[in-house]
Amino acid sequence: MDDMKNRLLGLNQKKILKPDAVPSVNLPLQDNGKDISSRSDRKRKRSILREAKIRLKCLSPKKACETPTIEPFTTPTTENICSSCFETQKENALFLERIRFLEKELEKTKEETKKNQRKKIKVMKTKAQFGRILTENKSLRSEVKKLSKIEENFKNILKATQINAVIENKSKIKWTAEDISRHLIIRSISRRAYEYWRNQIGIPLPSASTLKRWCSKFSCRP
C-alpha cells in the first residue's frame, strides 16, 4: 500500500521488504561512527519538507505565495508553485468579482420585487374601490328607479311636498300656503277621514295644530 502522506509531501515512500531480502542500506559504518551520507540524506529530507510546506501554503487563496531561499535544486519547483498560485489567485479574484456583481443584481431584483408588490397592492386597492363604487352606483340606480316609480304613481294623488316627504322620509315638513289650503278643505269635509289618512295610512298631512296656527294668521276683515 502506498504511503499517502509521504507521497503528498514528496518524500520517499516506504518500501516493504520481501521475506527473503537481505538488508544493504543504512548499515552501521566501520569508521569511528561518522555517517556523512546519512547527514546529507537528512539535509535533503528537510529541504523537501520545507518545499512541501511552501506548496501547501501557496494552495490557500488568502495567503500570498512566499518563496524563501532554498536549495538550488528546488528552484524550478518553487517557480512552478508560484506560477500556479498566481493563476489560482487570479481565478479567485474573478470569482469574487462575479459574486459581487451577482449580489448587486440580487439587490436590484429585490428592490424591483418590492416596487412591483407595492404597485400590485395599489392596483388591488383601486380595483376594490372601483368595485364598491360600481355596487353603490347600481344600488343608487335601483333606488332612483324605485323613487321615480313612486313619484309616477302618486303624482295625481299627492303634492310635490308630500312626495318629497315620503321619498326623503322627513319628520318635519315645510308646508306651503297652497298645501295648507288644500288640506283644510279635506279636513273640513271629514275630520275622521283626515286623521285616518294621516295616522293609519301614513300619508304626509299637516297636524291639527299646524292647521290651527295657519288659520290664526288669516285676516277675515273686509
Image (tube, rainbow, N blue to C red):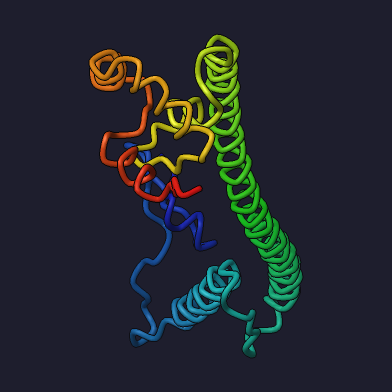
Q: Residue at x 28, y 13 (%)?
A: 193
Count of marks overlaid on the render: 0
Residue at the limit of the structure toward the bottom, as seen here: 69
Residue displayed at 60% across by 70% down: 61
- x%, y% of residue 185? 42, 23
* Outermost front residue: 222
Quarter occupied by residue 27: bottom left
Give me the residue at 42% from left, 61% from top. 25
- x, y (%) of residue 11? 50, 62
Side of 81 relative to 191 (left or right): right
Q: Does 141 sit left or right of 49 as displayed?
A: right
| As drawn, 165 above or below 2 | above
Could you say where residue 183 lies in the image, as x and y percent from the top left?
42, 26
Judge whether 88 appears above or below 126 on screen: below
In front of the other: 212 or 88 = 212
* Image height of 57 relative to 71, above or below: above
